[in-house]
Amino acid sequence: MTDMAADGPEIVLLRDTSRDDLTAPGRPRPVRVHRWRARGGGVPSPPLVVVSHGTGGSADAMRWLTGPLAAAGFEVVALDHHGNNHVDGYEPEAFLQVWERARDVTFALDVLAAERPLGPVGAAGFSLGGYTAAALVGARLRRAALARVVSGGIPLPPLPEFPDLLAALRARGHGEDLAALLTGCDADLTDRRVRAVFQVAPAMGALLSPESLRSVTVPVEVRWGGADAVTPYEVSVRPYVEHMPTTRGRSLGPAVRHDDFFAEAPADPTAAPRAAADAVAFFAARLGSPAAADGRPGQGAGLR
C-alpha cells in the first residue's frame, strides 16, 4: 500500500515475513514507512536519516524532527512501530519486546537498499526511539534486569497505555511466567550501515548493559529536558552519556519536560525546534551536507 499527500511523505506498508503480526499470528509483521525523498534526482545515494518515535507515538508525531531534516535536504524515513503506535492501536507484547523496534529499522533499510545503494545513514529517536537508535549501534538490554521486571522484582515505569502491562500480557494467554517473552531481548542488533545517532530524551538507559554502551564507536549526540519526569536524566539518560565513549550531550533547559516534544500546547514551545536544529547540524557534519551532495549551494528545501 502506498499513499502520497501533496505536502507530506510517501507512505508505504511493508511486511516482514521473518516475524509475525501480533494481531494475527502467521501473518507477516507490518512495518509502515513514511518517506521523504531527498531533493535532486541526480543524487544516487543522498544522506539518509531514519527516525523512531516514542512508545505509543507515531511517525506523524515526529514531524517536529522529520520536517526540518527533510527541509534541509536529507532523505528521511520514519516508522510506525507495530503494536506500539497510536495509529493502529496498542498490543501489550510490543510494549515489552521493545528490541523488535530496531529490527523494524533494519528491515526497512534492507528494503530501501534493494531499490538502490544507500548513502550514509543516521538514526534519530525520541524517548523509546532514542533507545531504538542506540540499539542499532550496539546498545544491548540486560536480560537479567528485564527478567526482574516481568517477575515484579523491578517496578515498571508508568505506562498510560497499559497501567498494568504484566496483567495485560497474562490476559493475552502468556501465563504467569512471562520469561518466554524475553527471547532475543539481549541480542546484538547492530546495523553497520548506521554511522551516527541523535537521541532526544532517550529511555531504557537503566536496563542497558554498560559494557555494550562502551562498545559503541559511532558519534552520538544526546539532548534532554531538565524537568523530564518520564525519562529523567539520572535514571534514563545518564547511562548513555556516561558509558558511550563517543557521546556528547546537553540539556535543553531546566524547565523542559518530556511532553514538550508532543503536547499540543508545550510548556516550552522552543524545545522541539531547538533539538531538531541541533539534529540537522549534527547529521550534516557526520553524514555530509545534503546540499553539498546535491551539487547546489545552500541548505536545500522541501520535498521532491
Image (tube, helix red, strand yellow):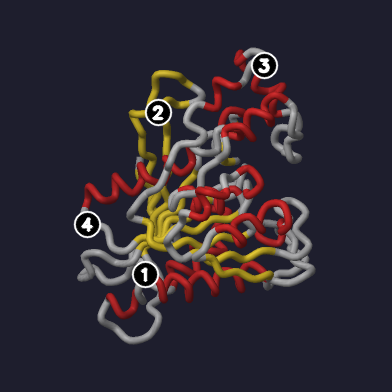
Q: Residues within 10 Å of mark 2 (few under 14, many from 20)?
A: some
Residue 119: give x, y in percent of width and height.
Answer: 28, 63
Query: What's the mark number on residue 287?
Result: 1
The N terminus: image quadrant: top left
Residue 253: give x, y in percent of width and height.
Answer: 73, 72
Residue position marked by numbered label 4 in the rendering:
117
Callout 1 amino acid: Leu
Residue position marked by numbered label 2 in the rendering:
19
Which callout, 4 or 2, points at the residue further toward the start of the chain?
A: 2
Task: Classify mark 2: helix, strand or loop.
Answer: strand
Q: CA distance from mark 1 to mark 4?
A: 15 Å
Camera-side residue: 65 or 185?
185
Residue 216 is left or right of residue 243, and the answer is left
Residue 133: give x, y in percent of width and height.
Answer: 49, 53
Which callout, 1 or 2, points at the residue further toward the start of the chain?
A: 2
Residue 293: give x, y in percent of width and height.
Answer: 28, 75
Q: Residues within 10 Å of mark 3 (few under 14, many from 20)?
A: few
Camera-nearest label, 1 or 4? 1
- Contact (Cβ within 8 Å) of mark 4 with mark 2: no
Task: Classify mark 4: helix, strand or loop.
Answer: loop
Camera-side residue: 234 or 202?
234
Q: CA distance from mark 1 to mark 2?
A: 31 Å
**Can residue 199 be seen here?**
yes
Q: CA distance from mark 3 to mark 1?
A: 46 Å
Camera-nearest label, 1 or 2? 1
Q: Residues within 10 Å of mark 4 (few under 14, many from 20)?
A: few
Which callout, 1 or 4, points at the residue further toward the start of the chain?
A: 4
Callout 3 amino acid: Ala
Q: CA distance from mark 3 to mark 4?
A: 45 Å
Task: Classify mark 3: helix, strand or loop.
Answer: helix
